[in-house]
Image (cartoon, helix red, strand yellow):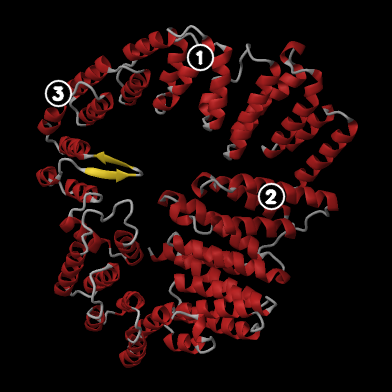
Amino acid sequence: MMFSRSISLLIVAQLFYSVPVLSAPPALSKACRAELISEVYHRWNDINGILLNDTLPRVARELENARRRGDTEITLNTLDFAATYIAGQPNSLSRQDYPKLSAILDQMVQLARSLPSRYSLVKTGVLTKTGQAYQQIGQPEKAKPTLQLAARASSGIQGNQIIAKAQVQLAEAWITVKQFPEATTALDRAVEQTVKAKQDAYFHRETLSKIATLYVQAEQPARALTTLKLLSPRDYDPVVILPAIATAYIKTKDPATAKQILDSILKQVLAIKDVEQRESHLMLIVVHYAPGGDLVKLQQIAAELKRPNRYRAVAWLAIAGEARNFNQPKLRTQALSQLIADIKAANMVDQFGGRFDNEWYGELNNLANLRNYQPELKTIITELRPINLLGMVLQDLMNQKQFETARLMVPKPMPVQIDAAVIDESELWLDRIAIAQLQAGQSKPAETRITSENQDVRRLIRFAQAFHQAGNRPVATQSFNRATAIATSMLEQAAIANALSQIGYSTDPVLNALAASLQKESVISKRAELLLSLSLEFSNARSDYFALAERAGLANQVEFITLARRNALSERRAEDAYRFISSPKQTPSENFDFILQLIELHLSQGDFNRARSLLDLPVQTLLNAPESSKPPEVERSSIFHRTALNLARAGDLETAISLAQYITPAKEREQLQQRLRCLKSL
């Protein structure tokens, strides 16, 4: 085990401390450089807007292209795009994708280190964001050396404001990895540079305010106070920052200074005449002072809140949450009891968590999410049972297999506000409880719930699926048969077919009934539109959907093919699209346009191999097929042009350049050939 860890540390050391050796790239013309950079922008524009888990191979490919090209400007653009795109997204990945992202971050470190020293700003920014991303995927052993590289690179940055911004970002990253001394060093430098930029009042005010907050997070309360003295009292909110500074003093074992600061701000707040303003300030003091754990003082401050309103409720939630954190269960119970009493006194139980309750539940939920006070919020909801949030309580009881308690808790009616409508969800929740019991091996409640159902097809489908999952095939089959018997619309029949297909039951009877319904429409275009309207119901049973098209006499009809092609591309369903690649009833122009759109879909999804494979079809057709299979002569040049560019983006520049010779006029041909030769050098 020690040997394995030593090897791991050696690899990390080589990654961060060995200098990459890059061969000098061939010289580029001005036009070629512009073309390459334009192509980089084009590809990153395709990547942006797509979640990171769907683009990891493409990001890695772009970084490898930049490394291979060895051109500083392309490297700068690629790194900037990659760092900005990845920032904030690592938490959206599943753990199985972490190694892929880690390899990408390794690429970014190596590329950033290859940049000349005059690009210190970009290097610092990229390495800072990369270090934070390493930390987010649980690799502090890479995060720290990356941030050290960023700190070293930052020494080359010029300009007071630019230096200050870079150091603030670096400090935030150091705080993320809990390296407070390094964060403090960065903040000290940021203060120094910000003071020198005093002529820009806005920058001076905003940056110093942020630095003071970061000093608190880095447990440097004295420096935070010193920074505040560089500001006008109008430039910061004392009821937010001063309690936080007091908390930092408690964490650094200086309760006397904490008390002095807190008493000072309390004296000012208690002197405020306006009750609303005074109570909102007292609430903020409690919230920002609470993490220090001075629970006695927190109770004293809460006692100054005289009214049962949202300010006092938020304060009690903070006290209850920190009482749990500091192992004071009795105080936690008292605080929660007071909070619940306040909600009742304010007549908020029925509205709590409703559409128009942005203040009580909204603010409590925000604080609970921010500070991990969700256990306290759940206790409140369980006690109050507010109609709009009762589902949370019921789900929790179901998870604990307390089915009877959950069933008895469901009120009738159970009016829940959804958007502008009020819906009775009592039957829905009783169904959910019965299905949960079925999954736990208790089938009787589910059988009882569904016995008399003779109207709701989708309800029968839900129970049929649940019985199948529980291994009770006879009741599942019976429920599906009942659903089929009462289905009155094609949408309901389609939903039944989709459900049957998912669990491996025969869909033939339902598909035959659907086909018969569709064939009642004699106008083919309208029949095709009807079939298309069923597509979403077959979301998990595409083979059955196209089998239905066959039975309805639509599979080879141009009206349906046109609609199905358009739908496949708009829904980004490549597998659906492949069913319609060759259609003799479409014109050659329509077929070419569809195939090229499908190729471009593959390219946008990063599936370069399938894109390249499919490109053989238009290439061979253009070059070798009979004239009847080709688009009109006037369209061919633009199709050659589009196909060549797609070949280039799929990585086959040799074929792209060869194909470009068929483009007319000569000027356009030469421009594209020059462009492709430039791309080849990338």
Q: Which mark is residue 452?
A: 3
Residue 69 lies, in percent from the top left, at 73, 53
- What residue would you read off at disc 2? 41
> Is 59 positioned to the left or the right of 132 in the image?
right
- What residue would you read off at disc 1? 526
Nearer the observer: mark 1 or 2; the answer is 1
Residue 291: image quadrant is bottom left
Seen in the picture, residue 204 relative to 537 is either above or below; the reply is: below
204 and 22: which is toward the camera: 204
> Is 427 positioned to the left or the right of 30 in the image?
left
Residue 142 lies, in percent from the top left, at 50, 65
The CA distance from mark 2 to mark 3 is 62 Å
Residue 306 lies, in percent from the top left, at 23, 76
Amino acid residing under circle 1: Lys
- Residue furthest to the front in view is 273
Q: Secondary structure at mark 1?
A: helix
> Is 150 positioned to the left or the right of 427 in the image?
right
